[in-house]
Every structure is written in structure tokens, then in C-alpha cells.
Amino acid sequence: MHTRHLARLGLGMLSGACALALVMAPAGAQADDIDYFCEDVVVTTPQSQRPIARQSAIAIQSSPVGTWVEVKRSTSATIIQTCLYYISPNANSDGSVQVTVKTVLQNNNYNGAIFWTTTKTIYDNGTQCAFIGEDWNSKAYHNESISAEATFAVRGGGRHRITSIETGFRGSSETSAGWDFTIDIPYTISSSCEQGGSISPAGNTLVGVGASQGYNVSANDGWRIRDIEVDGTSVGARSNYTFTNVSGNHTIRAKFQKVWKVKFVDGITGETLFEQVVDEGSGATAPEVPGHNGWHFSGWDGDFSHVGSDLTITATYEPTISVRVPSLIPCRILADGSVAAPSGYAIENLSVVPVRAQSITTSGMPADASYTLRDGDTVVHEWSGADKNGSDLRIGSSASKELALSVSNVTGAGEWRALAEAAAASGNAQELCTITYTFEAAS
């Protein structure tokens, strides 16, 4: 610190024919330091100034915000000077804080006017941040006041020393009537988020030294919280975070992930089997499928390996085709060579869906024999040297259908005769032929 303070303030006062110039004293100067002359009133700087006392090592508390705070007041016989500052309660978009400094001069018990006739250069921690010029149009009479102020942005929370250098008035000696004080700016916590959700409070928030500040994070519908970064470091996916015992500026950023809903449905009952939220581009995990009598699971009806939209995936089932056909039809050969087939020859569909005979084939039939299979009056199959398909044979779900079988007479001396005689001689049944049915679900 130089022995002469570099803060100066000049004021002009006019009263009748006597012109007076007043230079205010520094905060450390008392009213006794003012000397009166006919032409001028000059406040001189003490030959030696006390060094600025170091602040004791106590916990720094943030200065008040959102209200004017008086720094110092100097009083003489003619003027009361008050210096104040104001800290904005809200941070700027870039995280800085607006600070306004103001000097108010009151014309106290004097018949003339006072004018603002000085310039003031303002510094934040030694760096120029604002300037106030002289204004001769600003004047005050008895019991009136004039003021000048400057607003500047302070960057970074913590302690800031605000000083000023002032020009002298009409060449008078340097004085130390300007500002020299410290303010403790609250720290700034800057919050932001990516697409897909919100964080509250948003933007820049001022937080006092040693205080706490909480944040809530919410994902929009169709999104999830992917991560929270505090000062660039991940703290995991969480819906809230609290800064405690704040002692510096911080950042917090919320990140979100687009997700889709995948629902798996039972294709038989329509019941929802499982619902899953899947990150965009990822695959869903299918659940186990329930079993249903008469049906077997054949797969899912859609692709869910790379999900890019909400999906409903249905389990596809196919009916289990089960048809019971009599294993043996006992036919009797009569004396006249005719063949009597029994009535009540029925095929039973055990499936849960209607079926149709996709094919009916015969094997082992004597070349000189033939037969005809009827569904009522409709021929569904016959054999006479080769298989001949007739109309469809259809059976309803869980139903039976009785069929009529007619076999040709035994004649001549061919294979059919030999087979009939062998059966008569042995008294044992002989296999005439095998009829094979292939059934499928009826469309």
C-alpha cells in the first residue's frame, strides 16, 4: 500500500459570491481533518495511513444479497457522504454476479448547491471493472442529495476487494475518500440438462458460503435418468442431489436416455405376460411362455432385438393336431363272397381346432379288391388299383365323425380270393390293407 491512498472524490459547492470547493475525507479521516478557507475547503490526507488490518481467520460468511448495504459514512459540517453496495440475488446467465456500488452525498445545513465533479475508477481485486464520470448537471441544495453509481459483474464466489481511484477536485491534493471494502460473494452452482428431462432449480443459483443446495431431476415420459455429473464427474443415475457446506462454485448436469416400452402378450388369452422398459437400440428380454393344452408355442410375432419404438409382442401358438383313428376294422366275408363292414366306424378329433384330412393313402390292398370311404353320402376317398381323393374330410374341434366303409366282393381266383380263403381256413383275421390319414388344422 502506498502512503497516499489512490481513491479521490471531488465536489463543487456554490453559495452566493463565495465559491467553495470541498474534497471529502477517507473513511479513516474524521471531521476534524477538514480545514476551512474563504475560497476552498480542503480535506488533506494524513501523512501516514494505517495499513489495512488483516481480517481475522474466521469462517467467511456470504454478504447479504438483494439489499443495499452501507459500507461507510463520513460527516462534515456541510456534507454527509454514504457509500453502499448491492449484490443481485440472482446470478447472470454466465454464472457471474451483478454488483452495484453507490455514493450518496447529502447537502447538510448549507445554503449553496453541491455538484458531482469527480471521476471514479473502480477495481475488483485490483482489476478495473467500472468507471463513473463527473456530472455537473447533478446538484443538490440544502437537505437534498445527489448520488452516482456503477454496476459491474463479479466472477467467482468468495472474497472480493472493491477499491476506487478518484480524481482530485481542481488540482487539490489527493484524498482517500473512495471505496475500499471487501464483500463475500455467494458461490454459483450452474445446473443444466440434456434433452429428455429437467433439473430444478435450473440455471445459475447463488449459494451462501457453508450453505446447502438441493436439486431434483425428472425424466420426461419415454426417457430415464442416465447419469448425473457433478463438476464433470459422474455420481450415478439419481433423482436428487444436494451440495452441502458449499465452499466453491459448482456445476451439475443431468443426462437422460430415450427408452421404449415393450409389452409381451399371451397369444391365447391376451393376458400381458411381461412389460419392460428398454433403452433405444437395445434388446428386450422375453419372458417364459405359459403352456396351453392343445397348443404349442411357435415363437414371437415381432423382432425386439433392437428396439426403436413402443412394441407389443405376441406369443404365437399353433394347435397340436391330434386325431384318433381306429387301428382295426373287422370285416366279415360272407358265403356269397360279399364283405360286410361294421357300422360305427368313427374318427375322433382331439384337437382344439377343426381339422381336415390333408391326404388319405392306402397300402397293402389286393390288386383285385377295392373300397370306398364316405362321409354320409359324400365320397371322401376310394381305392381301385390306386388312391382316389374325393371331397374334403373335415372334423370339428373336439368332435367325432362316423364314416361308412364299403369293400368290394371276393370274386375270381386272384389275390383277393386267396386272402379270403386263408382267413376262412385258419379262422384268423387277415390284414386286408392299411389306410393312412394325414390331418391338418382346417382353415
Image (cartoon, rainbow, N blue to C red):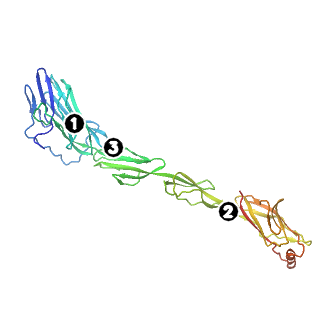
Disc 1 packing (10 Å; few <14; some 14–19; many ≥20):
some
Counting from the top left corner in percent of width and height, residue 425 is at 87, 79
Residue 205 marker:
3
Counting from the top left corner in percent of width and height, residue 290 is at 60, 60
On screen, residue 29 above or below 439: above
Out of 214 and 104, give the one closest to the viewer: 104
Q: Which one is closest to the eye, mark 3 or mark 1?
A: 1
Q: Earlier in the sequence, mark 3 or mark 1?
A: 1
Does the CB distance between marks 3 and 1 fall below 8 Å?
no
Out of 87 and 245, give the one closest to the viewer: 87
Please name the residue shown 8% across and 40% down the image. Answer: 48
The residue furthest bottom is 426
Q: Earlier in the sequence, mark 3 or mark 2?
A: 3
Label 1: state its secondary structure: strand
Q: CA distance from mark 2 to mark 1?
A: 92 Å
Counting from the top left corner in percent of width and height, residue 52 is at 14, 43
Residue at mark 2: 320
On screen, residue 382 above or below 39: below
Quadrant for the C terminus in the image: bottom right
Q: CA distance from mark 3 to mark 1?
A: 28 Å
Residue type at mark 1: give it: Phe
Q: CA distance from mark 3 to mark 2?
A: 68 Å
Label 3: state its secondary structure: strand
Label 2: state its secondary structure: loop
Residue type at mark 3: give it: Thr
Residue at mark 1: 131
Quadrant for the N terminus in the image: top left
Residue type at mark 2: give it: Thr
**Left or right: 410 as drawn, with respect to 167:** right
Q: Quadrant of residue 25?
A: top left
